[in-house]
Amino acid sequence: MEIKFTVPEISCDHCKETIEGILNSEENINSASVDIEKKEVSISSDTKVSIGDLGALLDDHGYTVVE
């Protein structure tokens, strides 16, 4: 399963590293990558991942998920 969403606050490598670190540490996520220019996050998972859960997880760190 591939999921893509936008995070408007992405602006630099620090944002990229932080978001990838948070998401890649989650058990049900195989990989997460951030495109700084597009402000887009791509996630690969073998199981269904809820955008709401991802939003809550990133919100704790000051990032907003926009579908």
Image (tube, rainbow, N blue to C red):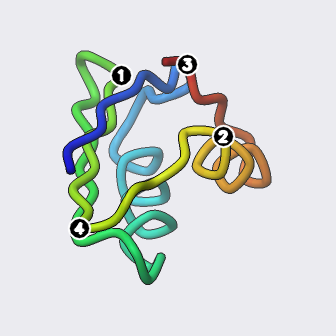
Estimate how packed mark 1 is, as few (under 14), some (14 to 19) or many (20 or more) residues with alpha carbons within 10 Å.
Answer: some
**64 sits left or right of 2 in the view:** right
Q: Earlier in the sequence, mark 3 or mark 1?
A: 1
Query: Going from the N terminus, do you reach mark 4 or mark 1 first?
Result: 1
**How far apart are labels 2 and 4 at the CA level?**
18 Å
- Give me the C-alpha separation between circle 3 and circle 1: 10 Å
Q: Residues within 10 Å of mark 2 (few under 14, many from 20)?
A: few
List x then y, in percent, for residue 54: 58, 49
- Pointers 3 and 4 in contact (C-beta within 8 Å): no
Q: Is residue 49 above or below residue 35?
A: below
Amino acid type of disc 2?
A: Gly
Q: How many marks?
A: 4
Q: Position of residue 52 (x, y in %)?
A: 66, 40
Q: Which mark is residue 10?
A: none
Above or below 20: residue 35:
above
Nearest to N terminus: mark 1 or mark 2: 1
- In the orientation shown, which residue stands out farthest toward the front? 48
Q: Which residue is mark 1?
A: 39
Please tell me whether mark 3 or mark 4 is closer to you in this view.
4
Q: CA distance from mark 3 to mark 4?
A: 22 Å
Q: Say which amino acid is labelled 3.
A: Val
The residue pinned by badge 3 equals: 66
Tell me the number on the disc at residue 52. Answer: 2
Q: Residue at x 74, y 41 (%)?
A: 62
Q: What whole-number distance in Å separates the C-alpha atoms at marks 1 and 2?
A: 18 Å
| Marks 4/1: CA–CA distance | 24 Å
Q: Which mark is in front, 1 or 2?
A: 2
38 sits to left or right of 14 = left
Residue 3: percent from the left, percent from the top? 29, 38
Contact (Cβ within 8 Å) of mark 4 with mark 1: no
User: Which element carries disc 3, helix, strand or loop?
Assistant: loop
Q: CA distance from mark 2 to mark 3?
A: 10 Å
